[in-house]
Image: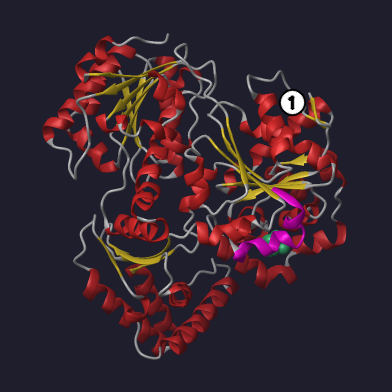
């Protein structure tokens, strides 16, 4: 389709609205930034690529920012489909940091973090055989032939040549027309320079995927624990550095004195300089030097170059720099046996607004960007065109019910209400007899429902129960997810997981894998010290009413929208959705349009006779 000289082509038969939206994006980019709100299953990635290809043909470059490194391959794989089917060919790259791309680091063990691998490279590069090979015999031809390169393509092709994948990637970056990378390389000054030198942002169009996450980036985040301080003291003792040992022990005493009494759900704020002894700048610099010596010695012994002394000094030096800044909070908590101190950056609009201006244009996209004006204000976007894609779902896909007699309102879910929830969910399960997810307002609500017999009630109906637990490893989570998905074939499964968690936000459940979703409560943040600080900060920025809306209400409803969107991933999907809290009625304008249109109120006892869309 040609529009005012801009040709829009998709590599497959377009679905409803796709061509019009691509065209609208292409046109809107001439005027300013774009805020694209499109439901899940719409196909945002190919549509945005289709809009950008005419710009790329004219020489614009594209930076595609995703939330985590693991998502960088998606736009590149999609671009490959364009290349194969439409013959458009661009050099595109999924970019990863040294942690994923260093061949030498494997010698120092598994699971090294970003700063450890960076450190290894900064010390060892001159002697690194892969770096030497890169300098002597790197051949870009096989990379360029592929055109669109996932990070594992770059890694494997580099390994085959015996050259460093990280430096190969950087060499390719200079010639690439599209790079997909994690948000950090765009929003953080500390990371951006490494890209901008080779890929000038000022000539690029930036795409921010899943942009609703921008409000909670926590750019300066860092945490130390009592354990960090104990290990720092031990390292200093071993080095014979009495001053650094005394410094770590001083902080440890202060921390224990002040915060040992915190309960698992409490938190307090602290002022970094008050935990430190007199003359702390000099002492922290000394500790930093000693920490550096520890890292060097460990590396020389072939061990991971980590040092708690170094971490402690970095944490406090950064914290002191930020002390007194509005929007920065220092939080003491005791989630388990040990106190932990965290640096928490609540700022978004103030930090992000100047970042967007570096680029020619920015496209922000997400399935939960509404209300778009609130989104724009909280992340500092001006000069934009909002494009809203209407919902793809109607009565043929979904039934939505709003229970009038359930709520997780209040601090605690009392026994009677917990029992009522279990009864309601059991009625739903008995009726749908398909894979179902109960997404809970929080782990606390989840624990109450489990204690009230949710698993037993589901098992009695022939369901296998899968639960997301706090602190679950990636491997365990993968096992739970696979088990639940397989249950759709073998019988039926019940997934119980908190909203905002990895299953309610990050997992895909196409087709039969998920046919019913029950939202147990609204996932408002608990009224903790952190929540209060966050609301107060937003109230200072935007006034009382808007501040509370932006800091407290919209984020909770976004989490709920994300969760209920799990069941409807394409226009062919069918699902039953139950909004299990009467307060959802008040917040309908903040929920997806198909939910607003289809929601029917009922009493939870009627869930065993609801109408099904299949
Ligand atoms: S040059 Fe490459 S392989 Fe060598 S240490 Fe640095 S990142 Fe690792």
In the image, residue 581 sits, relative to residue 530, either above or below, namely above
Q: Is residue 487 visible?
A: no
Answer left or right for 316 relative to 115: left
Magenta-tinted stretch: 189-205
Q: Quadrant of residue 262?
A: bottom left
Task: Categorize mark 1 by other alpha carbons within 10 Å: few (<14), some (14-19), many (20+).
Answer: many
Instruction: Pick whichever, 598 or 493, lies toward us.
Output: 598
Return the x and y of residue 165 as percentages of the image width and height.
73, 53
Return the x and y of residue 297 as percentages of the image width and height.
55, 77
Magenta stretch holds residue 112: no
What secondary structure is the magenta-colored segment mainly?
Answer: helix
Q: Quadrant of residue 23?
A: top right
Answer left or right for 320 relative to 265: right
In the image, residue 340 sits, relative to residue 295, either above or below, namely above
In the image, residue 207 sits, relative to residue 228, either above or below, namely above
Tell me what residue is drawn at x 59 percent, y 26 percent. Answer: 42
Return the x and y of residue 190 as percentages of the image width and height.
60, 66
Label 1: which residue? 10
Does any atom of ligand 1 lie closer than 8 Å to the CB of label 1?
no
Tell me what residue is drawn at x 39 percent, y 18 percent. Answer: 598
Return the x and y of residue 464 as percentages of the image width and height.
32, 23
Image quadrant in which the C terminus is located: top left
């Amino acid at each position: 389709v040609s529009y005012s000289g801009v040709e829009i082509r998709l590599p497959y038969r377009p679905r409803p609205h796709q061509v019009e939206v691509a065209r609208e994006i292409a046109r809107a980019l001439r005027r300013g930034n774009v805020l694209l709100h499109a439901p899940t299953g719409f196909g945002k990635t190919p549509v945005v690529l289709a809009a950008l290809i005419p710009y790329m043909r004219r020489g614009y470059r594209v930076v595609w920012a995703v939330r985590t490194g693991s998502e960088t391959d998606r736009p590149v794989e999609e671009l490959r489909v364009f290349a194969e089917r439409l013959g458009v060919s661009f050099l595109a790259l999924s970019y990863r940091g040294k942690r994923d791309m260093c061949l030498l680091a494997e010698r120092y063990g598994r699971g090294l973090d970003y700063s450890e691998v960076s450190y290894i490279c900064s010390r060892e590069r001159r002697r690194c055989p892969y770096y030497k090979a890169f300098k002597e015999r790197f051949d870009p031809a096989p990379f360029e032939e592929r055109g669109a390169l996932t990070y594992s393509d770059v890694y494997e092709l580099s390994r085959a040549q015996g050259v460093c994948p990280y430096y190969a990637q950087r060499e390719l970056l200079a010639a690439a027309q599209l790079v997909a990378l994690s948000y950090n390389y765009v929003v953080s000054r500390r990371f951006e320079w490494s890209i901008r030198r080779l890929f000038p942002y000022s000539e690029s169009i930036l795409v921010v995927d899943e942009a609703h996450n921008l409000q909670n980036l926590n750019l300066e985040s860092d945490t130390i624990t009592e354990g960090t301080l104990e290990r720092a003291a031990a390292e200093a003792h071993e080095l014979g550095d009495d001053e650094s040992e005394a410094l770590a022990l001083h902080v440890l005493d202060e921390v224990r004195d002040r915060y040992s009494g915190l309960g698992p759900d409490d938190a307090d704020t602290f002022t970094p300089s008050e935990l430190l002894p007199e003359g702390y700048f000099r002492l922290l610099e000394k500790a930093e030097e000693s920490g550096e010596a520890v890292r060097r010695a460990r590396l020389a012994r072939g061990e991971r170059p980590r040092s708690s002394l170094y971490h402690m000094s970095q944490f406090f030096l950064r914290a002191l720099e930020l002390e007194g800044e509005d929007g920065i909070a220092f939080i003491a908590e005791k989630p388990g046996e040990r106190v932990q101190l965290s640096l928490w950056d609540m700022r978004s609009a103030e930090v992000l607004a100047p970042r967007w201006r570096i680029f020619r244009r920015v496209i922000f996209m997400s399935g939960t960007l509404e209300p778009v004006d609130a989104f724009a204000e909280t992340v500092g976007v001006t000069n934009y065109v909002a494009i809203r894609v209407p919902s793809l779902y109607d009565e043929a896909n979904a039934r939505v019910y709003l229970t009038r007699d359930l709520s997780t309102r209040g601090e605690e879910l009392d026994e009677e209400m917990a029992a009522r929830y279990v009864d309601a969910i059991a009625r739903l399960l008995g009726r749908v007899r398909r894979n179902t997810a109960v997404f809970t307002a929080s782990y606390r609500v989840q624990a109450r429902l489990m204690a009230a017999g949710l698993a037993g009630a589901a098992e009695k109906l022939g369901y296998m129960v899968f639960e997301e637990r706090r602190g679950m490893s990636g491997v365990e989570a993968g096992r739970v997810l696979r088990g639940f998905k397989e249950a759709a074939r073998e019988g039926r499964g019940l997934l119980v997981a908190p909203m905002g968690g990895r299953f309610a936000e990050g997992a895909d459940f196409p087709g039969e894998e998920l046919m019913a979703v029950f939202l147990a409560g609204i996932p408002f943040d608990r009224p903790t010290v952190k929540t209060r600080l966050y609301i107060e900060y937003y109230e200072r920025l935007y006034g009382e009413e808007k501040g509370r809306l932006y800091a407290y209400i919209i984020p909770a409803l976004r989490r709920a929208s994300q969760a209920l969107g799990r069941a409807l991933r394409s226009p062919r999907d069918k699902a039953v959705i139950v909004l299990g809290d009467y307060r959802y009625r008040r917040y309908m304008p903040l929920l997806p349009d198909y939910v607003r249109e289809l929601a029917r109120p009922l009493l939870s006892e009627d869930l065993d006779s609801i109408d099904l869309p299949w």
